[in-house]
Amino acid sequence: MRWSLIPLACLTVAIPVASYYALPRIPPLRQLPEPAAAAGSRFAASSLRFARSEIGPAPQLRPIITNVQILDFDGDERNEIIACDARRQAVVVCRRDDDGVWTEQILAEDLLVPAHATVVDLDQDGDRDLLVSLLGDILPNDGVIGRLVWLEQTAQGFERHVLLDDVRRVADCQAGDLDGDGDLDLAVAVFGYSRGQVLWLENRGGGRFVEHELLSAPGAIHVPIADYDGDGDLDIAAVISQDEEELWAFENLGEGNFKPRRLWFTINYDLGSAGLIQDDLDGDGDPDLILPVGDNLEVTHSFPQAYHGCLWFENQGNWTFATHRIASFGGTYAAAVGDLDSDGDRDVVLVSMFNNWDNRENASVVWLENDGRQQFTTWQIDSQPTHRITVAVGDLDGDGRNDILTGGLHIMGPYDRVGRLTAWINKQGSGKR
């Protein structure tokens, strides 16, 4: 019996020894390379002229703005700003008068950490409603604390309906007719923490929705809806950022059936996927995907890394997407697409949440200039305010040129360059700065 233990004892010794020589070893501390502090942190000044402006009341506390949008919310042919203010637990609208003065109005409050407000006429009665995705907690939390709230616009104001309240933290909701029956269904990103989901909610009328799970995975951030395969119906894309770093698509097969497709993944679990937007970046008629990467919220002391920046997934048809790195930029957190230089091409604006802010010259906002062949030059718009988490592109002052709007999330230092809603007004061709 004792002789039978000899092979086991040999393996006990041999496996650790073999592993020592076969597996990569961590070098001593003195041999570790310096952090990539300079990678993608500073750039040449923008070739366009912008005037920085703070919009709305000055923050009394450190701002926590989770989402900004520029759109004609009132239908008056003048753009407004819709913002999710997690500090005030509210969704607000900012309007600009004829004298250029911005005023702010609360559309809904007592919303526990609103992450995104989707503007859509959900009941198709001719006015604009809001679908508000609620995290419930800005910090990691795996409790069933998320909600999806429909703010129905009525003559008396916004009437609140809870569409989902038995889920973990909800990060995004997008609307579209997913089953082809003529009404608007919903795609929902349930971020959670260690558990999450991608859902679609089937509209049964009268404010009733039936929940269908497309994927069980933690860290779903955004679920952009588009016809990705060009077959005439709406598909869903999703970014998963928690256990894995993946892009998924859910091909619409008709009648409420979807086929899951994993479009892309990386073995770099620290990549920091921070969102996903769809746009026809190359102007060839099909929707592409743009992925900002650089979220460092999972670490206590964040630092820009060489792999931070922005990836463009070029739609080549038949569910094939070619991956292109279009920028390296430390701590990238959000992207927006729009034509900033009025040359007809789709440019990209990136903002940083986790740059090295000890260097006061490091960029917080950059512009990726598209040369028309999808070759991008990175220009620095500004180095402050810091900690930009959301960005939108649109005409804020009615002059026909696209401007830039950002929101700040200040939950970690430094706190010497704080900004809530910060805009950069495009002065190109005006002779002003």
Image (cartoon, helix red, strand yellow):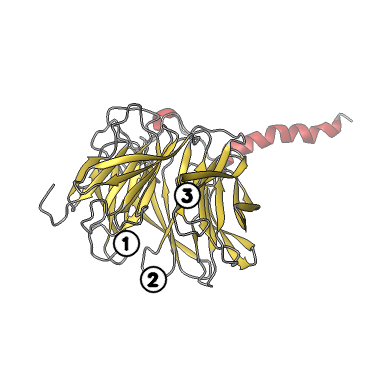
Q: Position of residue 341 (x, y in %)?
A: 22, 59
Which residue has dot 3 on it? 154
Labels 3 and 2: the sequence-earlier one: 3
350 left or right, relative to 431: right
The amino acid type found where label 3 is placed reads: Thr
3 and 2 marks in contact (CB < 8 Å): no
How many residues crowd around disc 2 within 10 Å: few (fewer than 14), some, or many (20 or more)? few
Q: Position of residue 26 (x, y in %)?
A: 49, 34
Please state, as top left, top right, bottom left or bottom right, where the N terminus lies in the image. Answer: top right
Q: Position of residue 351 (x, y in %)?
A: 33, 44
Looking at the image, residue 362 lies above or below residue 129: above
Which residue has dot 2 on it? 284
Residue drawn at (59%, 52%) of the image: 207
Say the numbered circle drawn on residue 346. Answer: 1
| Label 1 vs label 3, nearer the camera | 3
The Cα–Cα distance between marks 3 and 2, rounded to whole angstroms, is 40 Å
Labels 1 and 3: the sequence-earlier one: 3
Q: How many marks?
A: 3
Labels 2 and 1: the sequence-earlier one: 2
Q: Residue furthest bottom?
A: 231
**Label 3 secondary element:** strand
The amino acid type found where label 1 is placed reads: Arg
The Cα–Cα distance between marks 2 and 1, rounded to whole angstroms, is 12 Å
**Label 2 secondary element:** loop
Looking at the image, residue 359 lies above or below residue 322: above
Q: Residue furthest right?
A: 1
Residue drawn at (30%, 33%) of the image: 357
